Image (cartoon, rainbow, N blue to C red):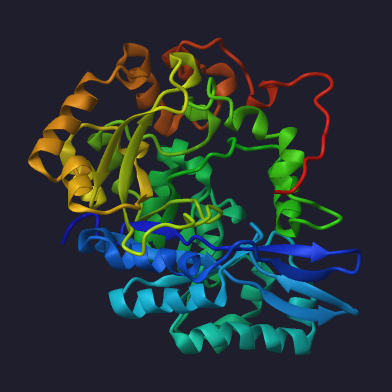
């Protein structure tokens, strides 16, 4: 069996946005330009993907909310990101599970947990019935963020075959926290993103996880600022997209926080912008792979490509584009496509973390396959030459030093600055400094 078998947890492209309508807390779904083709897009990409790609999927996670009425208002309990799958997408997810043997995973990881979900007998009973509807259809993996609910034992009693995941928002970053979660009933442990840069602790956790027969997850792709001071407020605002109270975070409050650095092409290249794993070589990937059961990739907020072909399929892709500094911003310079991560690894050229784990070929035809897919000898050679000749900070003396340090740098950037040295930038202590001015105020944008 390949060492990449069931190695990656992939996001589902949930379509619907959850919104609040007016001051009475009436919750609705925002449906814009959704058609049957968009709802079927994800299913088609998995159906059309190479079997080696499907073999590498540990699970596919999605969001769906529980709706109920309490104290005279309509309420929602669901995921922190405020997007959910349509009913047809849910049907398609169960088809993926049944047809291809790929487990699907429901996410309920809201940051605020209404007390009535547990203490009100009627609401708790209906919430259990809600989970039961998925359970009866064959759902066996669920992320649940409500610690008191897990501690009560109601879920374990009603769903004895369900495997429970904690959420990354629990910030499990040491052995004791992992043991605490296991004691509450979680057997799939999603680690905190800080462990991407703390392999010393990850090694200790991996040893104990094996002793306890736990399945461990590490978020391999993460664009958020390490230890982001805005995170808690962001997560509280985000589920209420479109409400008179919250509005869309990324169209409003994000201009005070992450929009200042995430979309600045000058800084966006730096590994310290987020906490993604940096696999500059196969050996660096192997260091992580030996310590983690599943790598989780983010991206559930991405919308399906409208008007894409039903023959589109999922793959791994590398798309090289110019940036502002090169004067070629927006220009695609090179494209490579791989059937599976194993194909990427077997290239032996490094840059593994620079590949997109859920790329899409939207115009699949023989000409494109022969032109881009790296398992064809000519394309393999072309890819080897491209990465061999690529002028990149990873290859410089300062870049190699950075890549060696990142797995254990613990995101203490204020007195390190190896990222800036590798990319030739001036030192700065905090991302919160980037593009920060005394009048960095809030200006509301118009919804699109």
- At x 60%, y 20%, the residue is 414
What residue sits 21% from the left and 55% below the top? 3
Classify residue 252 by image quadrant: top right
How far from the left and from the top, in percent, is residue 339?
A: 23, 52
Q: List x then y, in percent, for residue 361.
A: 32, 51
User: Residue at image x 17%, y 38%?
Assistant: 347
Q: 256 left or right of 6? A: right
Decide which of 189, 325 is in the foreground and name it: 325
Seen in the image, is 66 located left or right of residue 198?
Answer: right
Residue 112 spot, x, y in % from top left: 74, 62
Residue 157 visible, this orientation: no
318 left or right, relative to 18: left
| Residue under the point 76% across and 52% down | 237
The location of residue 337, given as percent across then percent down, is 26, 44
| Quadrant in which the N terminus appears | bottom left
Residue 226 sits above or below residue 4 on the image: above
């Amino acid at each position: 069996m390949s060492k990449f078998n069931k190695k990656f947890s992939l996001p589902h492209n949930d379509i619907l946005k959850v919104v609040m309508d007016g001051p009475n807390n009436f919750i609705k779904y925002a449906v814009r330009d959704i058609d049957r083709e968009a709802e079927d897009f994800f299913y088609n990409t998995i159906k059309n993907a190479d079997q080696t790609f499907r073999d590498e999927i540990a699970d596919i996670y999605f969001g769906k909310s529980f709706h109920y009425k309490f104290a005279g208002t309509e309420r929602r309990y669901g995921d922190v990101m405020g997007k959910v799958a349509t009913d047809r997408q849910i049907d398609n997810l169960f088809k993926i599970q049944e047809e291809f043997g790929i487990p699907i995973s429901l996410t309920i990881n809201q940051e605020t947990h209404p007390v009535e979900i547990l203490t009100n007998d009627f609401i708790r009973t209906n919430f259990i019935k809600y989970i039961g509807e998925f359970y009866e259809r064959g759902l066996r993996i669920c992320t649940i963020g409500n610690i008191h609910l897990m501690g009560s034992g109601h879920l374990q009693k009603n769903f004895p075959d369900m495997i429970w995941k904690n959420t990354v928002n629990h910030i499990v970053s040491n052995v004791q926290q992992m043991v605490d979660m296991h004691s509450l009933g979680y057997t799939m442990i999603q680690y905190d993103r800080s462990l991407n840069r703390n392999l010393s602790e990850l090694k200790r956790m991996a040893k104990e996880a094996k002793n306890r027969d736990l399945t461990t997850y590490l978020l391999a792709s993460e664009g958020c600022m390490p230890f982001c001071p805005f995170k808690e407020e962001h997560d509280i605002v985000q589920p209420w997209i479109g409400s008179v109270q919250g509005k869309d975070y990324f169209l409003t409050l994000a201009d005070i926080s992450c929009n200042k650095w995430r979309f600045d092409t000058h800084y966006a290249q730096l590994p310290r912008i987020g906490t993604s794993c940096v696999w500059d070589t196969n050996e660096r990937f192997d260091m992580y792979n030996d310590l983690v059961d599943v790598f989780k990739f983010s991206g559930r907020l991405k919308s399906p490509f409208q008007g894409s072909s039903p023959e589109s399929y999922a793959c791994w892709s590398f798309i090289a584009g110019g940036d502002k500094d090169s004067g070629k911003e927006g220009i695609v310079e090179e494209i490579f496509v791989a059937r599976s991560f194993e194909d990427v690894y077997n290239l032996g050229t490094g840059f593994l973390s620079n590949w997109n784990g859920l790329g899409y070929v939207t115009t699949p035809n023989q000409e494109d396959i022969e032109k881009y897919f790296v398992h064809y000898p000519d394309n393999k050679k072309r890819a080897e030459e491209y990465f061999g000749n690529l002028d990149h900070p990873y290859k410089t003396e300062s870049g190699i030093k950075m890549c060696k340090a990142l797995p254990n740098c613990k995101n203490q950037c204020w007195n390190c600055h190896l990222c800036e040295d590798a990319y030739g930038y001036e030192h700065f202590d905090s991302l919160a400094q980037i593009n920060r001015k005394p009048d960095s105020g809030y200006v509301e944008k118009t919804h699109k």
